[in-house]
Image (tube, grey):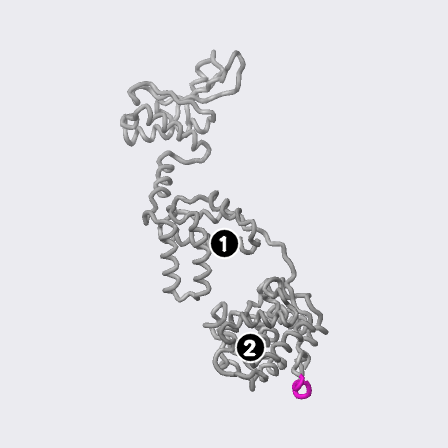
Amino acid sequence: METNKGKRKKSSPLNSWEHPKKSSITIREVINRTAGDDYGFSYQVLIPAKFAGKRMRRQFKEKEVAFAWAKEQHEQLLQHGQHHYNLTGYQSKDAFNALEILEGFDITLSQAAEFAKLHLNPPAGDISVLELTATLIEEKENRNLRSRSINDIRSRLGIFSRNFGSRLVKEISQTEIEEWLNNFTDLSVRSIINYRLCLSSFFNYAVNKGFRVDNPVQKIPIPKIDWKPPVILKVTQAEDLVLHAAKTDEDMGLLPLVALGLFAGLRSTEIYRLDWSVIDLERKLLTVGPQIAKKRQLRVMDLMDNCVAWLQLCHNKKGKVAPAKSYINFAKLTNQAGFPHWGGNYSNAMRHSFGSYYYALTSDSSKTAAMLGHRSSDQMLFDHYRSLASRTEGGKYFSILPANAEQSVVAFNPLD
């Protein structure tokens, strides 16, 4: 396949090759020697003057790289002839330096140039972070994305734009983004993950629109969250909260919000969108429509007996379940009920309490998932609600009833 000229030169222990075969391009071993000491071999490629106009030598540390370069030179000669060597001294040196940089990457100069061209001149041209953010948000609005989701994107990308807004999207590197995320020392791990997710979606959008050829966020590691059991209310705490809501219902109108949170497990965002027209107290059914549900999927829930009992006490059963600016009065209510810092650990305590006590009472993961709007295989269900309460506590929780309903309402019994 290759002629080993070293075999004809008995006096020299060094090898030489013609590569490719019949190309007249020679590769020979060269001893690296300094001050009389040997430091291994290099490999010198010799191109005859008949090809390059003058004899050319290039030396490589690795044999494989020398052979690859010799092959590439021969291919270029076949394609372009001697014009291949009509380079200025600077161009020739630059090409040689580029080949050294590419050593070990199994890529030619032409392929490297095409790669650089795509990165420097993406198909759709140049656009700044601010401009692409505006385009993305407009597209989300046209697709009828919920205002809360749009506001979240606008907020996170707005903060990102404080540092990168005027920069071209194609220029921003993985290292820069990683350093930016690492500066959020005052945020929780969950918040940092949410920022990373938002940026990853942003750069995926840039790739899909042709403003980049890669997503620099993909290789940034996702921070790990140390799992902590969610905070749930004790049975006595849940009773205090719903009793305070009932006492102040005429003034604050918070009883339906508390009852549906504690005894139906609805998300607060779902309750704020809910209308009394979807609650059927006679049939003990609640319909959470796709325009309300977080995942835009219809779910019909069987209301617990004690939830129905508390809802029957509500003064106003028309229009929105939660009155305007309920969150202000809810802060007052939780303070009166003995939770002055509800917004911290207790922010999702009503929903978590429902899920924990319902799962403890029924031992039915599929039904619990359906009630909460999760998939039945959702690991979040088990992470959040398993083993946080006992079956006995579950029975007590769903036996929390208004005083005037104790004789007429039978608490939920999963064995019935």
Q: Position of residue 219 (x, y in %)?
A: 49, 47
Give the amino acid type for the residue marked by disc 1 in the picture: Tyr
Query: Which residue is label 1 attached to?
Result: 195
Count numbered badges in the picture.
2
Quadrant where the N terminus sits is top left
Q: Which dot marks residue 252? A: 2
Q: Which dot marks residue 144? A: none
Residue 225 on the magenta segment:
no
Q: Position of residue 367 (x, y in %)?
A: 60, 73
Query: In this rendering, would 350 be left or right of 197?
Result: right
Q: Residue at x 45, y 35 (%)?
A: 105
Can residue 212 be seen here?
A: no
Q: Position of residue 124 (x, y in %)?
A: 32, 49
Q: Residue 157's image quarter?
A: bottom left
Q: Is residue 240 above or below residue 42?
A: below
200, 85: nearer the viewer: 200
- Return the disc, 1 or 2, that comes first in the chain's sequence: 1
Q: Residue at x 54, y 55 (%)?
A: 191
Where are the magenta residues, as a range? 403-409
